[in-house]
Amino acid sequence: MIDYSVDADGIVTIAWNMTDRSMNVLNTESMTEYFKAVKQAIADKAVKGVIVTSKKPEFLAGADLASVTKHNGAEGLMANSNRLQAELRAIEKSGKPFVAAINGTALGGGYELCLACHYRIAADNPKTLIGLPEVTIGLLPGGGGTQRLPRMIGLRAALPLMLEGKKVNPKKALEIGLVEKVVPPADLLAEAKKWLLTEGPANVVKPWDKRGFKLPDGPVQSPKGYETFGAGNSMLREKTYDNYPAARNIMSCVYEGCQVDIDNGLKIESRYFVNCVMSPEAQNMIRSLFFAIGDANKLASRPKGVPTQEYKKVGILGAGMMGAGIAYVTAQAGVAVVLLDSTKAAADKGKAYSQGLLDKQVGQKRIDAARRDAVLGLVKTTTDYADLAGCDMVIEAVFEDRAIKADVTRKTEAVLAPGTIFASNTSTLPISGLAEASVRPDDFIGLHFFSPVDKMPLVEIIRGQKTSDACLARAMDYVKKIRKTPVVVNDSRGFYTSRVFATYVNEGIIMLAEGVAPALIDNAGRMAGMPVGPLALADEVSIELMLKVQKQTRKDLGAKYEARPSDAVAELMVDKLGRPGKKAAKGFYDYPADGKKRLWPDLAQHFKLASVQPDVREVKRRLMYIQSIETARCLEEGVVLSPSDADVGSILGWGFAPFMGGTISQIHTVGVEKFVAEADRMAQKHGARFSPPKLLRDMAANKKFFYAA
């Protein structure tokens, strides 16, 4: 777990090496061993200095979150935190120089171990990431990060790194001041030893332990400090609406802790750290953003006994925005792509999309021209279906029309070898129906990508009625290959993500029809934690597209179709007012070429404002609860397979408030009994769509939970 060695010059090397894990992490066992080694080195009079490094490719990934979440309450957490702070302070005050030889990624608690050393040297590896990203899972740096980093690089430089959870490569870390030196990997340990033997003895006292220490960019109580925290708190409030305790607590830690000595500052940090860990927001974010997403990325639900599919060649039908995006991420993963469209010009335009993205990366010096050319060289454009022969999978990304999809399915299968997967990228059309055009429906599956494909991390895998386990497993292998997160759902109209996402947009439109002020609707959506208000989102998605889906659904269901108040609004906006959405620069908002978007001033003429406006809390509740209610229906119907899948899909698919942990975690956080009672109240006041399904009523009656308390 911890390798300890001492050389003839009195230099000790303490190397992290957790053989039972793929990466080194901080937990009770590893920290006990580490600090045991530290104490041994400090106590040995023959030791002149200590190198802290790793024998794994990564330095230290951070804390083992399983151990963080399994605690003995606030008192136990505080005791553990204080113990950690004391052990790290012992390094700083040991009288012996410690140098962190950062050979790979050092994040969170891993980097905080480096901060407690007297010097930091990083190996020049562009894949290495360094930083304090705890805020992204609802926590704050609890190993001294909020106190040491501002004292090292100043308040203004340190705060954004912690508040945004930034991770940087070694060269950027050197520029910012996170490390003091960057060297070739082969020279790392030699450079560390050289520093210990030459400069180390004169640098065994940290700057903040010296009399007269001052923060690099001035004290908190100064004009610059007032500006930093005044503007910082305002910007934080504007961005988070105070939904994330960790961000607020980081600001408080730095503000309070940097006005006192380091030891009292660390005590302040410990109190705020415990507050974060105990918060429902942190529990939600750790459960969904770390454990659930981790399980999804590991393909935990992949059918057993199916050999892993290796992908060498993938065909893509349709070179529009979706097809072009899928081609880009596939080629980026080193897989050859056949990009087919009805004309060579259209196919070439799709390939040009990849070139544009890659050229931008070259300009930013993220990749070199050789890498760009290699990726582009993997994409072949064509109009000939014969070029699809030999593909391991073909993904159809043509227009959302059953007849067109059926036509390309038949043409493609005519040239494919038996067992080749055919996947449809559709957001609404049931897969089982599309598979009727296939001669081998057991190898037919849905892959629902999100736009823009290069940025959106989720792929919704839709299993049709006849899709085989082998097809599902191999499709999951492809999603992993292109470094996306898969969520598997069963077939239904709208599947899971489109079906539930639509409730958010529709509820906003329904409120508009009721006379709720449009600014109140969209502001409430953002205040509740959604990235965009429902009316603005309708414009982004396209009101016209929503209307087309509505008409197709009405046609498919016939007398079974249940009209919604939002239907009439979409018909009015598109068919009568000619305002289809952002693509036409006019929808619920205007999109002037020379300025920011703004709500269409004439909305009030068509949607008369009610004389009494609802409380913003009620608007937020309507927008958020409707999504969780529809998710519970999806669980009840077997569309989505587990609460964790639902949570991952909602956060990664359409940006459901991360601090809530997802649509099911919202119910869990509120409490099932309380949620059901509130849903019943809203159903009585606003309509039957809020009526909770039997699944929730039964859980409430039996006092059951979705997750362990």
Image (spheres, helix red, strand yellow):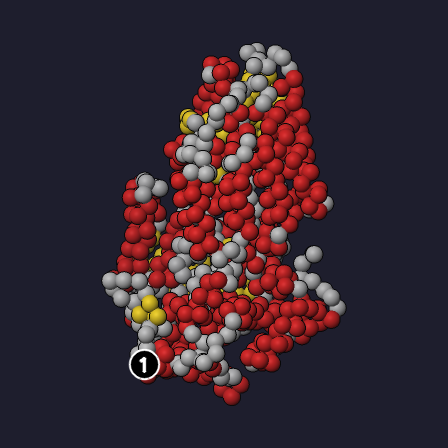
Please give left or right for residue 425 compared with residue 2 in the image. left
Residue 400 appearing in the image:
no
Residue 438's place in the image compared with 277, above or below, is below
Residue, disc 1:
577
- Residue closer to the observer: 298 or 116: 116
- Residue at 51% x, 23% y is 210
- Residue at 50% x, 60% y is 529
Residue 399's place in the image compared with 394, above or below, is below
Q: Quadrant of the N terminus?
A: top right
- Residue closer to the observer: 151 or 676: 151
Residue 630's place in the image compared with 187, above or below, is below
Q: Quadrant of residue 239?
A: bottom left
Residue farthest along the bottom direction in this orientation = 559
- Residue at 67% x, 26% y is 36
Please give left or right for residue 401 compared with residue 77 in the image. left
- Residue closer to the observer: 255 or 249: 255
Q: Quadrant of residue 648?
A: bottom right
Please give left or right for residue 334 compared with residue 277 in the image. left
Residue 524: x, y in percent? 47, 66
Residue 333: x, y in percent? 42, 48
Q: Secondary structure at mark 1?
A: loop
The kind of residue on which mark 1 rests is Leu
Residue 143: x, y in percent? 58, 36
Please give left or right for residue 72 compared with residue 406 in the image. right
Dot 1 alpha-carbon crowd within 10 angstroms: few under 14, some 14 to 19, many 20 or more: few
Residue 419's place in the image compared with 246, above or below, is below
- Residue at 51% x, 15% y is 201
